[in-house]
């Protein structure tokens, strides 16, 4: 009976494993200070080259700075 259970549940276990790995990657990317700073520089360059308007720049900059502040808040409490 256990072999049948393993066969039936293996796709589900694989999907759970994959979703865990994706979640880990997203968390790592969201908390990588260097990556966020790199994105801020890229955003500024795109704004200076008139690839994006000021409203888009301001919105994205605010989001990135909030992420950066959240990282610093975690480091201070950790």
Image: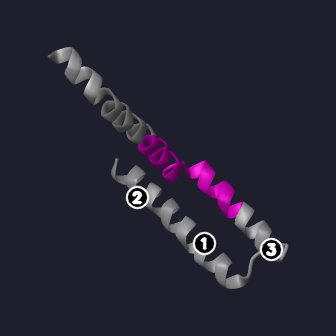
| Residue in the foreground of this view, choosing between 24 and 39 | 24
Residue 47: which quarter of the image?
bottom right
Identify residue for label 2: 73
Q: Which residues are magenta?
A: 22-41
- Marks 1 and 3 in Cβ contact (< 8 Å): no
8 w.r.t. 78: above or below: above
Identify residue for label 1: 60
Identify residue for label 3: 51
Residue 26 shown left or right of residue 48 in the figure: left
**Kind of element beneath mark 2:** helix
Residue located 26% across and 27% down the image: 8
User: Which quadrant does the N terminus fall into?
Assistant: top left
61 w.r.t. 39: above or below: below
| Residue in the foreground of this view, choosing between 51 and 39 | 51
Q: Position of residue 57 (x, y in %)?
A: 67, 76
Residue located 49% across and 62% down the image: 67
Residue located 43% across and 60% down the image: 70
Tag nearer the camera, 1 or 2: 1
Separation of disc 1 and disc 2 at Cα? 20 Å
Characterize the magenta stretch by its predominant secondary structure.
Answer: helix
Separation of disc 2 and disc 3 at Cα? 32 Å
Q: Position of residue 60 (x, y in %)?
A: 60, 72
Q: Earlier in the sequence, mark 2 or mark 3?
A: 3
């Amino acid at each position: 009976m256990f072999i049948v259970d393993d066969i039936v549940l293996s796709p589900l276990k694989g999907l759970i494993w994959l979703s865990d790995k994706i979640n880990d990657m997203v968390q790592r990317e969201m908390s990588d200070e260097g990556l966020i700073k790199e994105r801020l520089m890229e955003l500024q360059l795109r704004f200076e080259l008139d690839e994006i308007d000021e409203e888009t720049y301001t919105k994205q900059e605010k989001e990135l700075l909030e992420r950066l502040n959240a990282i610093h808040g975690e480091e201070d409490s950790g």
